[in-house]
Image: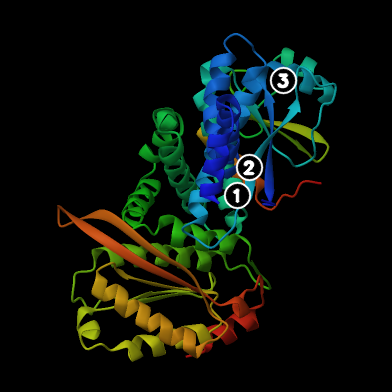
Amino acid sequence: MWTFLLALLLALPIGVAVAVAIGIVIFLHPDHTKKWVATIAWIVSVFYKKAEYLAIKWEIEGDLNVFVNRLESNIIREFPRVSIEWSATEDSENVVWEENRVILVMHDRKHKSKNVVHAALLFTSKTLLQNTSFHISKTQKRSMELFATLKILEQERSGVVPQFMADYFAPQVQSDEALKELIRQYTVIERIGAFFPILIQEIHCLGNKVFLEETKKEKTIAEVKGLVEFLIEFTEREVGDTKTPTTFVGDFMRCAIRVVASRAVRERGDVEKHRDDIDGLLQRSLENVYLIGSDQNMNRKFVDDVVSGVLQDFERVQLRKTYRFRGKIKIGGAWREVGTYLVHLHNPDAEDYLFTKDKLEKENARP
Amino acid sequence: MNEPVQNIDAVHERDLEKLLADMGKLEEFKQGRVLCKFCGDRITTANIYSILPESGSINFICQKPECIAQLFEHMDGKRPQ
Ligand SMILES: [Zn+2]
């Protein structure tokens, strides 16, 4: 296809060729295109005020949708693309607003950073963490909103980070020790690449689940705390450590995380032990099982062998993502390079949203 | 290319009066009688974060981090009608 396109471009007059080339780039990367068109629209808006509507809209849509694209390449969830809809504009006769829909107020060009920050906060809360207030604590939710928004802005529009830190992050985090501690933990988890692919993905799914019959909030709060602590322990694991737990099971989140492998087990080539344990987890109707370990070649090969065994045992289970991440963590005051290898297995038969007390007890009681 | 879309409703501050007039809130706003749903501070063009039409009334939320966080908690479980 590329050879044909190149031949086509060469055969066209230069002006048409440039227009076609731009058209292809826009078609292939619509959200990236929005980001740079927004920059041009901001310049035009100095002379022509109406361009400001396009600048605001495309800047925010470009930033958030490029982030969503990037996020989806690391996790299995699909998130909606953001579209800014004007409730009222100078030109339009129509004024549109609806019950229970937040209308974000966009400010003029002097405060354009604020617009991006405000929209990113709303996106994090409404899209990534929707309905999670029913299951996690205020501090857990707020800390995730702040940290996820910070990561979005750092990746997509680092220029607005100082404003976000000054106006939102620092005032809340500085004065709240619990919030500060959670942010510290997310920073460590982010350094092994597990913040969005495991933590946010699972919390997002938890938001869609309904537990009937009795309020379980204190239990789900404890479970989320347990997940965060498990991931922290994983980052602090020394090679050869056999004492730290190797498996986390989320009874409410319906997921499990398995650390593969300790050096001793791997050197014995003991694939079967891990395979049996993971088979056991899948029999408990857990929706997602993550295998996490070092990204060293030998370990990656070992993980892949375990995964092929599990996939032979469960025809319906899907290998949804393999994910390699290079990061740095601080252990005992010294920075250490770490590579993480993460494999996400998904059990479509276990996808469920409504849980009765009986059902949870039955599934969690399995060996 | 048929991805689901999440609309974020927005109003530019220069169109705020038009929207408030439609909502029947313009006079109140001009007189400084519109207050933040969560902290009770007076809402102005400079400090407004969002507007939330809810249960037949119009709520206003200011830009304080605490008020924005409370709005997000409040919105969980709410569905547009
Ligand atoms: Zn307020």
Three-letter code for the amino acid on which mark 1 is drawn? Thr
Marks 2, 3 in one chain: no
Instruction: For marks 2 and 1, give the CA distance.
Output: 9 Å
Residues at circles 2 and 3 in contact by the CB criterion of under 8 Å: no
* Residue marked by disc 1: A127
- Would residue A344 be seen by someone viewing this image from the given angle? yes
Q: Nearer the viewer, mark 2 or mark 1?
A: 2
Q: Secondary structure at mark 2?
A: strand
Tell us which disc is closer to us: 1 or 3.
1
Of the numbered discs 2 and 1, the one sitting upstream in the chain is 2
Colour scheme used in the picture? Answer: rainbow
Q: Position of residue A76 (x, y in %)?
A: 53, 63
| Mark 2 crowd level (few <14, some 14–19, many ≥20, 10 Å Cα) | many
Q: Name the residue carrying label 2.
A: A82
Q: Residue type at mark 2?
A: Val
**Mark 2 or mark 3, which is nearer to you?**
2
For the point 48% across and 50% down, the residue is: A70
Cβ atoms at labels 2 and 1 below 8 Å apart: yes
* Left/right of residue A328 with respect to residue A362 in the rendered view: left
Residue depicted at x 52% and y 38% = A32
Q: Position of residue A148 (x, y in %)?
A: 46, 47
Image mark for residue B16: 3
Front one among A184 and A282: A282
Is the residue marked by circle 1 packed among few (<14), some (14-19), or many (20+) residues within 10 Å? Answer: some
- Judge left or right: residue B21 versus residue B10: right
Image position of A352 (left or right of A94): left
Say which residue appears at 30% left-offset and 79% top-offset.
A302
Measuring from the top left, give residue A75's x and y in whole percent: 49, 60
Which amino acid type is shown beneath numbered disc 3?
Leu
